[in-house]
Amino acid sequence: MKLIGFVGMPGSGKSEASRVARDMGLAVVVMGDVIRSEAARLGLSATDENLGRVGNMLRAGEGPDVVARRTLDSAAKTGKELAVIDGLRSKAEADFFRAHSQQFVLVEVWTPPEARLQRVIARGRADDAKEGSNAESVLSNRDSRELGWGMNELINEADIRICNDGDLAQLQRFIKALLERIAAVS
């Protein structure tokens, strides 16, 4: 199986990049769904605090690549030769995908912090910062947790970097062209 992985800080545009891939008919597996599923199994609501705790618990109990292992199982079940993996958080996850795929391309989606904060507030997921005085603090805490999982090291080894500081249509066009190029080479 060939894999394209998206990495980026919360609110950078990974989900939108994955939406473009889905619209193109590519298989998309979201790593955060592994965490959300485990939280639901444990009877926990999908708050930022709970999801962070579950992510830490899984990694501590089953190793730093546990989310990647479960994600690869889901990707394989799609039956497709090429899958997009949304939301890598550590080098261990990328190393796992590299070792267990025919080809792995890591794409960083980068967005300025101010824009990320506004996007996270606007999308309104249960685990996101809310409008108000603590929104910056909530996003900062989430950034710190994810960087603690090794995201900075992962970002530094990205094969391709996308600067998402324009409008949504610009990002969508760029992602579509990038995915078409990668799929054509695959």
Image (cartoon, rainbow, N blue to C red):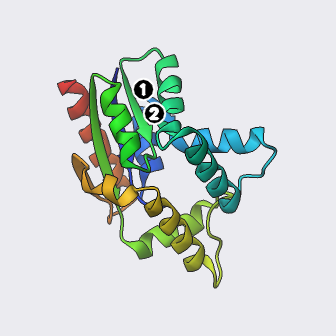
Image position of 35 (left or right of 95)? right
State the CA–CA distance, disc 1 to disc 2: 5 Å
Q: Quadrant of residue 105?
A: top left
Q: Residue at x 44, y 33 (%)?
A: 23
Q: Residue at x 64, y 85 (%)?
A: 133
Quick one: which residue is furthest to the bottom in this view?
133
Q: Residue at x 52, y 18 (%)?
A: 77
Q: Position of residue 183 (x, y in %)?
A: 26, 27
Pointer 1 with pointer 2, Cβ within 8 A:
yes
Image position of 71 (left or right of 3)? right
Q: Is residue 112 above or below residue 32?
A: below
Residue that numbered label 2 is attached to: 22
Circle 1: residue type: Gly
Circle 2: residue type: Arg
Q: Which mark is residue 33?
A: none
Quick one: which residue is furthest to the left in this view?
185
Residue that numbered label 1 is attached to: 25
**Quick one: 10 or 53, which is closer to the camera?**
53
Report the number of numbered marks.
2
Q: Quadrant of residue 114?
A: bottom left
Q: Residue at x 55, y 46 (%)?
A: 59
The secondary element bearing badge 2 is classed as: helix
Q: Quadrant of the C terminus?
A: top left
